[in-house]
Image (cartoon, coloured by chain):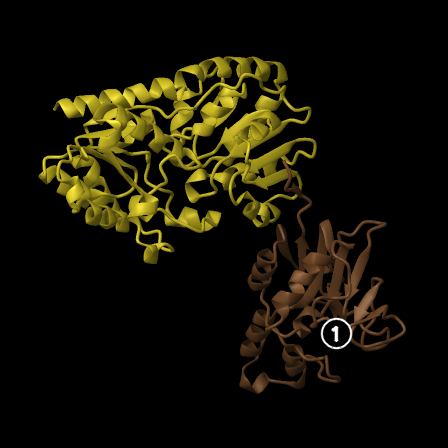
Amino acid sequence: MIRAVHISGDVVGGPGGAGQVTKQELLALKEVFGDDSVDVLQLQNVRPAVYASLDVPYLWDYFALAQLHGSRFDALQHAHIYSGCYTETIRYLRNRGVTVSYTCPAHARGPSLEERLKRGFGANLPHIDDDALWAQHKQGYLEANMVIVPSTHSEDFLRSEGVTKLVKIPHGIDSIPDHVAMFPDEFTVGYLGASGPDKGIPYLVDAWASLGWEDARLIIAGEGSQNWTGYIQSVAGKGKFCLPGYVANVADFYNAITILCQPSISEGFGIEIIEAMSYGRPVIASTGAGAADAVLPSTGWRVPPGDSKALADTIRRARMRPTVLKDMGSRARANAEPYLWEHICKRYVRVFEELRGN
Amino acid sequence: MVTELKPYYTPFKAGDRVIELGGGPGDATGMPIFRPNIDARPGPMVDIVHDLSRTPWPLASSSFNGVYSSFWIEHVSHKLIRNVIAEIYRILAPGGIAVLVTADTYAQCKKIVDAGPEGMSDVLSNMLFGGGDYDGNFHKAALSRPFAVKLFREAGFFQVETLDHPGIIGPQGYEKVETDFILEAKKSAAVITYEL
């Protein structure tokens, strides 16, 4: 008998941050409701094949609704939804007496259309950029029994939008690596992650281009990072850039850098910040990334989002203090420990238990 | 006044390998400044005979520090102009610079409009359409400063700017030339690798 369901447009346990978070959410749901009582609606079994080439946020709402009408959900008590737009689904479930928890990783409306065009962003985020679509999307957060946010920034943003039933649970990492490499001989700043418009990569490239160093390296790693070649050539007169694309073993990336830089414009969390800390790397994080919560003055720097000059100034300052960087890295590694999933998952369990009790 | 003449100096340095595009055969119809000179017409000062509107060019990638042309690119069909700009980008080494002296069709049209219907002349026809005295000597692309910058930026050049033509010394002394301009386009010298 299905008593709980995990709903998302992602692959639970898949690669990337969403995969890791959904995996832990599902583990917590199973701990509270029982292994055999939890079903999963996700990318593979929700989206009809005919829609495979479309990425329209609102379609997921109706795909999920269509599935939930099935009789196997007659005894459903709780639904947990990860990200995406599910306002109609949430209304339907609440009307049936099902409790709903809803993870919201967004913490800001997107950059303006003008800014996106200036920066050459190929995609946009209509469900958070457009006023009417955001109003529809936000309604889901207002109607859920509990919204889980990963950061102070997300919490502040949703409170400013009128959402009051909130709990903050940061994202985590699987383990602290036993051994980490020394800093590379060549000063190296690294970014690891997706290349979407919310990641702010052009600001990092602009910052690095303005520094013009020929004895230091910027690595932009992650699926499709090679596509930044043209942008780099159009803004950087000189400088060293490395675009390895997808990195199979993230340890290779973290051990190759001196500092991680997370220039996100809007990112609910950014697990790479915690991962870099676990590898003893100081972090320069935009406050547009939720995980900037974890960056203290003793472990890194926080800079405003969308500010390439602030990024460049901070990178320059960091490079001038190699001894301090090593100390910061050691402290960062120690500070990563509370972010282990084994600790974080227990906090999901407590939320689901409370909602089940209600 | 002759004193208004502001000479233009190319940004090429001693020792740079600079190729001239469409510099002419080395006679009254065209005299190259730089060598090698690549041109569709053979002649004593043509090092490589090739119709430059046909791409790819028989030149190695990243093989020149500089590319120079004077009143050549407007003779390339507007249908093919993006292809030839891509070739300029390809043959330039990282950090290399292209310098093109060319006609400003927009300014030419303004000059014609200002002249009025009674002011139309052989000189203005020659300005707008080219000399027309042999097959390649016709203008086939219309450029303005912003459009030229846009085309070169689209091709990947990281720094593109246009400069005033320095003017000429004519029979009446110094003459400002507002219907031509100089474009300088620099290719990034950024070193991009793809292995971690």
A65 over A327 or under it: above or below? below
Which image quarter is the C terminus of chain B in?
top right
Indicate left or right for B10 with A107 as reference: right
Chain B's colour is brown
> Closest to the observer: A333 or A98?
A98
**Does residue B9 appear in this view?**
no
Callout 1 amino acid: Asp
B96 over A26 or under it: above or below? below
Where is residue A32 drawn, in percent x and y? 23, 24
Which residue appears farthest toward the right when viewing the image?
A: B44
Where is residue A224 drawn, in percent x and y? 52, 45
Which image quarter is the N terminus of chain B in?
bottom right
Tell me which corner region of the image, top left, top right, bottom left or bottom right, holds residue B56. Answer: bottom right
Residue at 34%, 55% in the rendered image: A49
Q: Residues within 10 Å of mark 1 (few under 14, many from 20)?
A: some
Residue at 51%, 34% in the rendered image: A192
**Does residue A214 appear in this view?**
yes
Indicate left or right for B46 with B141 as reference: right
Residue at 70%, 60% in the rendered image: B88
Where is residue A3 drawn, in percent x and y? 18, 33
Tell me which corner region of the image, top left, top right, bottom left or bottom right, holds residue A256. Answer: top right
Tag 1, which chain? B
B7 over A260 or under it: above or below? below
Residue for badge 1:
B51
Where is residue A44 drawn, in percent x and y? 34, 46
> Closest to the observer: A127 or A120?
A127
Identify the secondary structure beneath mark 1. loop
Q: Which chain is yellow?
A: A
Indicate left or right for B55 with A295 as reference: right
